Image (tube, grey):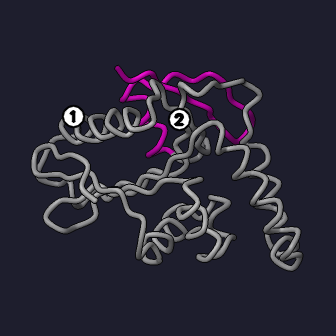
């Protein structure tokens, strides 16, 4: 379902046929807790509207993948992940290191419903090659703003690994503010008017 467009790029909400996108998220963000979960679990989260999946598309090519959840649904998501590992103890054992790292991703800062949690942002640079970085960032921020409007939210918050230099440069360049950090992670937020 198309939501809006800018400079020939379209923002689309995806609710069906999500298998390919799930595999791209797993491949491109291997540190994500989602890379140790299965497709059925991911798809159920979308069907239950606990997470929301969007793509930015240019001439039928995926230029970016975005997943978000509300503050309220973030608690449900954590509970469902806990249940998933409880029911699948072998997956728990195999992925224990990743799970421990993921638990460290919880921020001790309280957010209200005016915030939206950005779970995943995957940008395919090759599909933005014909435009400047400034224009590309402008397009992505335009779509962030539209996603926030859908949820009547005003700000995004997220975390990323310190070693993820590309993410660090993107969020710094786009005026996300660091509100916390630990040994491995940086927690950022941005109000988008």
Seen at 51% across and 22% down, the residue is: 177
Vertical position of residue 184 compared to residue 152: above or below: below
Which residue was labeled with disc 2?
116
The extreme front residue here reads 48
Residues rendered magenta in the picture = 165-193
Seen at 78% across and 43% down, the residue is: 104
- The foreground one among 142 and 16 is 16
Q: Specify whether 57 is left or right of 98.
A: left
Horizontal and vertical percent position of residue 65? 39, 57
Residue 111, by quadrant, is top right
Query: How crowded is the residue under tag 1: few (<14 C-alpha within 10 Å), some, or many (20+)?
Result: few
Q: Earlier in the sequence, mark 1 or mark 2?
A: 2
Horizontal and vertical percent position of residue 157? 55, 32
Horizontal and vertical percent position of residue 24? 45, 70
Instruction: Give the numbered dot on residue 62.
Output: none
Residue 45, by quadrant, is bottom right
Seen at 77% across and 28% down, the residue is: 108
Magenta stretch encompasses residue 99:
no
Horizontal and vertical percent position of residue 140? 29, 41
Seen at 45% across and 50% down, the residue is: 121
- The foreground one among 72 and 116 is 72
Circle 2 sits in a helix, a strand or a loop, which is it?
Answer: strand
Magenta stretch encompasses residue 192:
yes
Which quarter of the image is occupied by the N terminus? bottom left
CA separation in Å, label 1 and label 2: 24 Å
Which residue was labeled with disc 1?
134
């Amino acid at each position: 379902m198309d939501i809006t467009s800018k400079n020939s790029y379209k923002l689309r909400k995806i609710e069906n046929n999500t298998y390919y996108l799930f595999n791209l998220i797993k491949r491109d963000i291997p540190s994500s807790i989602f890379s140790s979960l299965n497709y059925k679990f991911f798809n159920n989260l979308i069907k239950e509207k606990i997470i929301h999946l969007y793509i930015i598309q240019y001439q039928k090519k995926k230029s970016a993948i975005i997943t978000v959840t509300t503050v309220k649904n973030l608690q449900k998501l954590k509970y469902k992940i806990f249940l998933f590992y409880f029911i699948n103890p072998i997956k728990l054992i195999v992925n224990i290191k990743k799970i421990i790292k993921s638990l460290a991703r919880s921020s001790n800062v309280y957010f209200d419903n005016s915030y939206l949690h950005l779970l995943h942002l995957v940008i395919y640079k090759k599909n933005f090659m014909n435009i400047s970085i400034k224009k590309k960032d402008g397009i992505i921020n335009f779509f962030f703003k539209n996603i926030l409007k859908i949820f009547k939210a005003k700000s995004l918050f997220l975390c990323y690994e310190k070693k993820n230099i590309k993410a660090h440069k993107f969020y710094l360049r786009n005026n996300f503010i660091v509100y916390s950090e630990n040994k491995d992670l940086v927690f950022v937020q941005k109000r988008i008017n």
